[in-house]
Image (cartoon, rainbow, N blue to C red):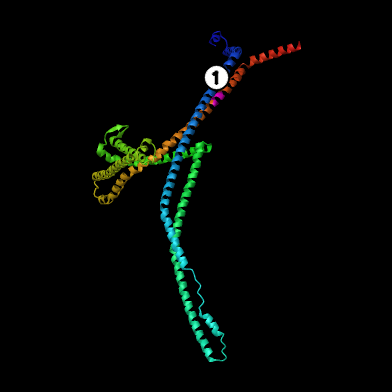
Amino acid sequence: MSFLDSLGVHPAISITVLVIIAIIVLYISRRPAHRAIISLSQVVHNAMRLSAKSVMSVESRLANRNREVLLAAGREAEERIVEREFERIEATVRRDLSEYPAMHRQLNEEITAIDEDYQASIEVPPEPPGWVKAVEAVAKIPSKGDPMVGNILEDIHHSLVKANTAAIEEYRKASHKRHDRLRAMMPHWRKVLTVLTSVDKNVTSILSRSQTIDRHMGEYESIVKGSDQAIRMLSSSSLQHFFTSLAVMVIAAGIAMVNFQLIARPMSEMVGGTTSLFLGFQLNQIAAMIMILVEMTLGIFLMESLRITKLFPIVGALNDKLRIRIAWFLFVMLLSLATIEAGLGFTREILMEADQATGALLRGDGSAAAGFESSVSWITTGSQMALGFILPFVLMFVAIPFETFVQSFRTVLGIVAVGLLRALAWLLRFIGTIFKFLGKSLLHIYDLIIFLPLFIEHKIKSASSDEVLSE
């Protein structure tokens, strides 16, 4: 363009000339340019597809690995649950079977006593008196107006009434004795009912545990088969355990912060609090954090020794005698640290009271609230000492959610990694597709720029073909 300007050509004409030259050059290099654009877009497209395929291959291997981890963790958890249920059933059966001979003997004794009382309470109909026949015979004697016969019959009537009254009284006494016998059977019935209720309760408990074991065994079989339902169940369970344990650990972190604030101030009297060592933390603060971490470590290993958690299998594999000794040693160490924290809580209250007294003396109003503070200071002192003693034992139980967090974190991390890999594979495919259609679009844009030579070429070819057809 500067060459044309130097010749005195108008700028518009020079621009037009340059555009015409560029169009001609582009028209001449149309085929190589098309091949270059197509090749470049195809290379990028194929590279993105290969990259996406490689990412999906990694995602597939990772998904299979996550599946194996989920199934292994679920199988281990179900084995522990089933083992615990079998231990409970074994203890229940052993306890019930040990009581069965005494229960059987008691039932036999009660049933025998009930049978004896029942036999004694059976009603025996009274025998008819022997003089009834004699009265019948006398009644058949013809009286013939003899007054002696009337007197005899009257005496017999009085004797009959008297005998009837005595028989009724005897019958009533016998009925009363039978009723007493039946009333005496009630405690035996109650004992039998109590024993049978206990047996029913034990049998119901065993049946309930058997149903629980059947349900867990069904889940265990599903896990062993590696069904999709088991995978979904284990995945949701892992996510639930992850977020639950994370929430509990956040709460534990808050408890640790309270414990830190409780012992950081008095710790300066032991190690000095004016020296800064790391990131602006003073020596007493670092010592307080180390003490809390030591307490949590002791709690974790105490839980391992009690076989509540299984973070370190070598601890649970120790023989019972050594393991119990280690558990007692860890408990004594934790108790000692808790006692030290209680003392630090007491020291903290003394230091705070000293600071308040100093401030009051500097302000000149030290005698006003001294009586009230001294009367209620024992409450805060006792509270701080109690917190200092209890919080280490509370932090000991962090081992349980920590184990759950560690176990579920692998699964959650695997699920997140699989999701990220799938998103990356989709992004690579999307980029490859974009480059593929971008290449086609560039071809059309290229042809649009040189549409005039292409139009002329098309007309020439059409005219030539018409001439050939006319000949």
Q: Quadrant of residue 333?
A: top left
Please state the horizontal and vertical placement of residue 249, each as a whole percent of the image. Answer: 39, 40
The answer to whether residue 371 is magenta is no
- Nearer to me, 27 or 71: 71
The dominant secondary structure in magenta is: helix
331, above or below 275, in the image? below
Does 339 sit left or right of 105 as displayed? left
Q: Give the residue number, with chain letter if any, for mark 1.
A: 43
Determine whether, in the image, residue 71 is placed left or right of residue 23.
left
Residue at image point 70% right, 14% down: 462
- Percent x, y for residue 386? 31, 47
Check disc 1 and give the amino acid type.
Val
The magenta stretch spans which residues?
429-434
Q: Which image quadrant is residue 454 in? A: top right
Q: Is residue 275 visible?
A: yes
Split into 4 quadrants, where in the image is the N terminus?
top right
Query: Can residue 13 be seen here?
Result: no
Q: Nearer the viewer, residue 88 or 248?
A: 88
Q: Give the vertical position of 149 relative to 310 (above or below).
A: below
